[in-house]
Image (cartoon, rainbow, N blue to C red):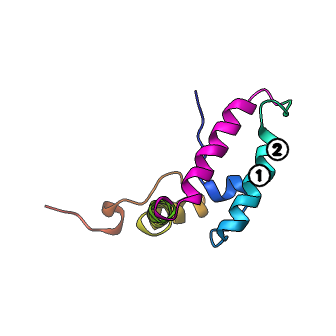
């Protein structure tokens, strides 16, 4: 099963506020590390392909803006929309609290 990277910024090792120059420098550094002709890693081809995908998204202003919106929507979904699930797991409960647990029965 092919695993894809979730966060292009983390993969390149730059912050989300990184400039185009910082992203380019990080890309070149990682490219030397993951290039299939240079790297001894067995997954070098896949890593280099993912690196190229991440860079192609982050180097283009329009694609980067769209990616940032998607990334923020994912973060919002995880942290704000499902806070009960996080709260339950934080305190050791085995499942999320449902509306019934709060006395909010419908019908």
Instruction: Give the residue at x 78% y 39%.
Output: 34
- On the image, the x and y values in percent for residue 88 come to 52, 61
- On the image, the x and y values in percent for residue 36 come to 77, 31
Which quadrant is the N terminus positioned in? top right
Along the viewing direction, whichever of 20 and 47 lies nearer the viewer: 20
Which quadrant is the C terminus positioned in? bottom left
**Residue 32, numbered label:** 2
**Residue 28, numbered label:** 1
Q: Does 56 lie within the magenta span?
A: yes
Q: Secondary structure at mark 1?
A: helix
Q: Does 5 lie within the magenta span?
A: no
Instruction: Give the residue at x 82% y 44%.
Output: 32
Q: Secondary structure at mark 2?
A: helix
- On the image, the x and y values in percent for residue 50 come to 63, 41
Label 1 with label 2: CB-CB less than 8 Å: yes
Q: Name the outermost residue toward the left.
A: 107
- On the image, the x and y values in percent for residue 60 come to 53, 59
């Amino acid at each position: 099963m092919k695993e894809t990277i979730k966060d292009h910024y983390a993969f390149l090792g730059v912050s989300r506020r990184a400039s185009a120059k910082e992203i380019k420098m990080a890309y070149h550094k990682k490219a030397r590390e993951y290039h299939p002709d240079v790297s001894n890693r067995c997954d070098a081809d896949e890593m280099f392909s993912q690196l190229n995908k991440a860079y192609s998204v982050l180097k283009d202003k329009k694609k980067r803006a769209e990616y940032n919106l998607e990334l923020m929507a994912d973060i919002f979904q995880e942290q704000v929309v499902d806070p009960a699930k996080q709260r339950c797991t934080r305190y050791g409960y085995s499942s999320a609290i449902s509306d019934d647990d709060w006395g909010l029965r419908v019908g």
